[in-house]
Amino acid sequence: MNSFDYQKATDFDRAWLNFELDLPLKPAANGRANPFYINRPGNPINELVDALLAPFYRPPKFFFSGHRGCGKSTELQHLLSNSNIQKKYWPVNFSIREETDIIDLDFRDVLLAIGSRLFREYRKRGGELPEQLLKELNGWKGKVEKQISTILDGRVSDIELGASIDAFFANAGLKMKLEPATRVELRQIVETDITGLIAIINHIAATIYNQERRIPLVLIDDMDKPDLERARAIFHDRREIMMQPNCAIVYTVSSALFYSKEFDSIRDQALFLPNINLHTASDTDHHLQEGYRTLEKFVNVRVNPSLINPTALDDAITYSGGVFRELARIVRTAIGRARRRKATQLESEDVEWAASEIRNEYRRILDKEDLKLIRKVHESRKLEYSDRLTPLLQLLAILEYRDQENWCDIHPVLRKML
């Protein structure tokens, strides 16, 4: 969707599109916030903005996380529309899945992606690189090509030896994403000269700053998708290397890392985006109006209120557990059922059907031990470290909330299973 496509739905067909589950809300063409964007109560993204705007000796690095579907991608996009951020920084926002295979992610892939995207974005926006930097890039590219040729024992490389720097960076990213053999080759080469790659990144960043008078800011999305072991290998084992690029960086990281002992390595620069509180830890029946109003607005900016019965909307919000993506999922599934009924308004029965669909998914994947732990969490609402708790948090079977202290509860659709 382009920015001009974000329009309120007056029928179920358009509403179906407006509740697309993977729809990060890009800023509008004029640089303003997207019309579908909803500011959450006490938005933690303001902490990140303040930290980015604070004075620093070296460009800062931050580690941004939250549960699946809580709105991390949308908040990063919204950050780009902040006028003060635009004045101070020259931003580059991309998904790591565009550059490499996120299932097989390595710290070297991330560094290469940072350098590649800085170079490509600057060229794309009409930036001119000085002759000295072009010579350095050509020298580094030539060394990489020579080593690839050696590894391949003279065979032609898929990286396209002798290609221009622009083509080299574009093709390297594509091959890293699609071809495991090339990924292994490049990792071997980067490993032998990691300081060389970081120097290249820093020279590109310095050139951008010198010409634009703004600090490069790299926002890397979808780095929360790899499993805990890969997240640990990148952000704990190689933390010092990931802090080396001389540009501001916001890394999205797996929420599992926040529930591990290795969290200590990123604690000082970590920011967690919690779910929306719909009730207190002590009383699930007491609706917090601020949370409900926030999610009502999330729905009402996307669809004409006349299409949804107010009781059905209230039910959908309750079942969402305060997770934006879950609410979109419930409403979209309910819309599908309402369309099949040839209805003109979404009713509570449609929402109940959507909730049962999600509950049935959990029935297939939760075992008896999971259900024991879920019952215990529902009774105590305490967030306690446990190896078994982490995957349930990632599955959204258990949801974390914050007020003065952290606490948790189960996904509301699971209450009937207990």
Image (spheres, grey):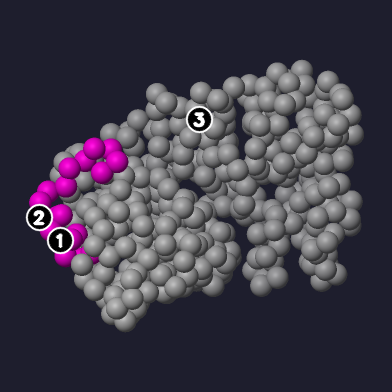
Circle 2 packing at 10 Å, graded few (<14), some (14-19), many (20+), is few
Tell me if label 2 and label 3 are in contact, CB under 8 Å: no
* Mark nearer the N terminus (1 vs 3): 3
The residue shown at (86%, 31%) is: 340
Q: Decide which of tag 2 and tag 3 comes sooner along the chain.
A: 3
Q: Which residue is mark 2?
A: 132
The circle on residue 136 is 1
| Image location (x, y in percent) of residue 34 | 50, 28
Q: Which x, y percent locates residue 270?
A: 45, 56
Overall secondary structure of the magenta section: helix
Residue linked to disc 3: 2
Q: Which region of the structure is painted magenta?
A: 123-141
Q: 164 and 253: which one is in front?
A: 164
Task: Inspect this view and state whether residue 201 appears.
Answer: no
Instruction: Please tell me whether residue 399 belongs to the stretch shown in magenta.
Output: no
Q: Is residue 87 left or right of residue 236?
A: left
The answer to whether 17 is drawn above or below residue 56 in the figure is above
Q: How far is disc 1 from disc 3 in space, using C-alphas?
A: 38 Å
Check disc 2 and report its element: helix, strand or loop: helix
